[in-house]
Amino acid sequence: MSEQRFIKVSSKKVFSIWKEFKKFILERSIFEIAVGTIIAAAFGAIVESFTDNMISPFLGIAAAKNMHNAYLPIKCPEALNIACTDVFLVTSTYPTVADAQAAGIVTWNYGAFIEDFINFLIKGFILFMIVKVIAAASFRKTKEKAATERECLYCCSMIPIKATKCSSCKSLLDQSKF
């Protein structure tokens, strides 16, 4: 008897969850989320391109190398007969991270990290500004709505702010109390 009850309860829960999921999928907001995700991915590609093609070259001038290929050797294989402590020799022999890793050198890729960190800062700042603009617009709408309506002291219905008589309870309103 308890198994039948469990099956009924379980099937009701599954049906309820399915109904909620269907409602979630069919609502307009899921499509807005999907569009937002696609736009965010495209936006990320633009910021990455901006960092790689506009900012990194200037960092490369300051560092006298391409920042994406800036690395420090951590461990060199014995077969290379190069000491990892001679950073200049290792980085001049293997100018790119890919060359060094192909030779078996363990690298610390600080240049790629710097580029990724700059990407993060740019994306974070732009998202911060977007949220700030949306919050300001939302605050303005709320402020405008509050300025056009008020609550009747007698019946608690919403009335125009300039009203002298409530349309719901027909009470005369004293403007000094508002």
Image: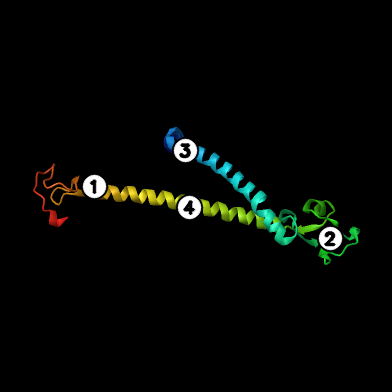
Q: Secondary structure at mark 4?
A: helix
Q: Which residue is mark 2?
A: 90
Mark 2 residue crowding within 10 angstroms, few (<14) / some (14–19) / many (20+): some
Q: Amino acid at mark 1?
A: Thr
Q: How far apart are the two marked residues, 3 and 1, measured between alpha carbons?
A: 31 Å
The x, y position of residue 95, in whole percent, is 81, 55
Q: Which residue is mark 1?
A: 148
Q: Are marks 2 and 1 in contact (CB under 8 Å)?
A: no
Depth check, front residue: 144 or 177: 144
Question: From where the camera sits, is residue 1 visible?
Answer: no
The x, y position of residue 59, in whole percent, is 68, 58
Sequence-wise first label, 1 or 4: 4
Q: Amino acid at mark 2?
A: Val
Q: Which residue is mark 4?
A: 129
Q: Amino acid at mark 3?
A: Glu
Question: From where the camera sits, is residue 133 visible?
Answer: yes
The x, y position of residue 24, in whole percent, is 44, 36
Q: Are marks 2 and 3 in contact (CB under 8 Å)?
A: no
Q: Secondary structure at mark 2?
A: helix
Mark 3 residue crowding within 10 angstroms, few (<14) / some (14–19) / many (20+): few
Q: How far apart are the two marked residues, 4 and 2, measured between alpha carbons?
A: 43 Å
Position of residue 92 in the picture relative to residue 113 (left or right):
right
Sequence-wise first label, 4 or 2: 2
Position of residue 178 in the picture relative to residue 61 (left or right):
left
Q: How far apart are the two marked residues, 2 and 1, measured between alpha carbons?
A: 72 Å
Sequence-wise first label, 2 or 1: 2
Q: Secondary structure at mark 1?
A: helix
Q: Which residue is mark 3?
A: 32
* Of labels 2 and 3, the one closer to you: 2
Q: Residue at the spot x=46%, y=34% of the render?
A: 25
